[in-house]
Every structure is written in structure tokens, then in C-alpha cells.
Amino acid sequence: MEHHHHSHDTEANSITALKIFRTFLKENGLSITKSRELVLKAIYSREGHFTVDELEDQLKLKIKGSYRASIYRTIKHLMEAGLLAKVQTSSHAKVAYEHTLGHKHHDHLVCDRCGDIIEFHNEEIEKMQEAIAASFGFEILHHSLVITGVCATCKRSKNRSPSNVIVKID
């Protein structure tokens, strides 16, 4: 799915995300390192979902040596800071992430056969979730609605291969 954003928005979000992240790191007694900032900037320069592999490929040009451990740690901190969300996991252990700042919250339809992800946004669902949480005195930090099924293409092609997509919400 194509998202069209002005690069100005991306730039603004990146700057805001950096401020939020620095504050989060300080409050948690973690250091603001160059590599953490590079990871954040790389993530916020992307659109849509990405995997750690894709992110690592993107950063290889900027950083020598294996960067994986640092990427994983930074991703963990970004999720704790509310700047990143985990999207879905398939049986190929392919975890996808997306940044959450400056994005209208969206939910996901995941095809059980081909693993395709369709994003949608529904204001009524959002309001209902907030109302339900409020009725329990519960503060929502992050939520992810994933509906699994069979996409139109797989239905047409009578693709009956067994499900190889396991959706896991962490």
C-alpha cells in the first residue's frame, strides 16, 4: 500500500520522535547514543511496515560491523517509549514493525493464506475501544486490532493452502 506524505511531515515527526526518545532515555537512566539516534532516524525515514533485516540493510551503509544487537535494543526502547509498534508475526518468524508517531491509528486485516496486510481505520471502533477501556478505568497505551481471514485474491484463486500465518500480538 502506498502512503503519500510530504517529506516535511516525515522530518517533523522525526524531530518530535527524537525529542520524545531522548526524554524517555533520560528518565530511564539510559544513554543517548549516536547509534540509537541513527536507528530512530532510519525508522522514521521509512513508510509502512519494515523488518529488522530491512532496517539492518538500510543502516549497513552508515555503520560498519554488526549492528543487530543495538537495533534490537533500540527497537525495544522505542516500543516502550510508544514510538514503535509490532505488527505481525508469521511462521517464518518475520516480525514487522511500524512507527506510530504522526500516523492515524490503523488496524489490520491479515490474510491467513498469503500473509498480505490490509490497513484500515474506523473511527467508531476507536471510540468504542476507548469507551470500554474508560469503563474499566483503564488507560490505553497501545492497542492493535488484527482480524485474520482470507483476502479477495486468495478467495478467487481458491488458494486452500493451510495457514502459514500466525498473528501474535505482543
Image (cartoon, rainbow, N blue to C red):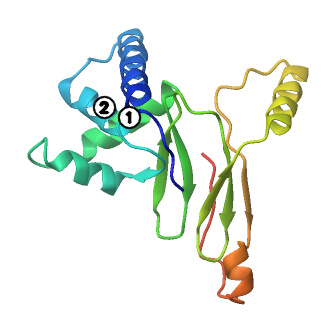
Q: Is residue 168 above or below residue 139?
A: below
Amino acid carrying label 2: it is: Lys
Dots 1, 2 in contact, CB < 8 A: yes
Amino acid carrying label 1: it is: Tyr
The residue labelled by disc 2 is: 41
Badge 2 marks a residue whose secondary structure is helix
Count residues near mark 1 (Cα–Cα under 10 Å), then give few for <14, some for 14-19, many for 20+: many
Q: In this view, does 128 lie above or below 137?
A: below
**Residue under the point 87% across and 23% down:** 136
**Residue under the point 58% across and 69% down:** 115
Q: In this view, does 153 lie above or below 15?
A: below
Describe residue 159's horizontal placement relative to residue 17 as left or right. Answer: right
Towards the viewer: 8 or 22: 8
Q: In which quarter of the view is residue 25 placed?
A: top left
**Residue under the point 33% across and 31% down:** 40
For the image, the number of numbered tags is 2
Percent from the top left, x then y, of residue 74?
Answer: 34, 34
Towards the viewer: 22 or 42: 42
Percent from the top left, x then y, of residue 30?
Answer: 32, 18
Badge 1 marks a residue whose secondary structure is helix
Describe residue 146's horizontal placement relative to residue 14 as left or right. Answer: right
Looking at the figure, which quarter contains the C terminus? top right
Q: How far apart are marks 1 and 2 (CA)?
A: 5 Å
The residue labelled by disc 1 is: 44
Looking at the figure, which quarter contains the N terminus? bottom right
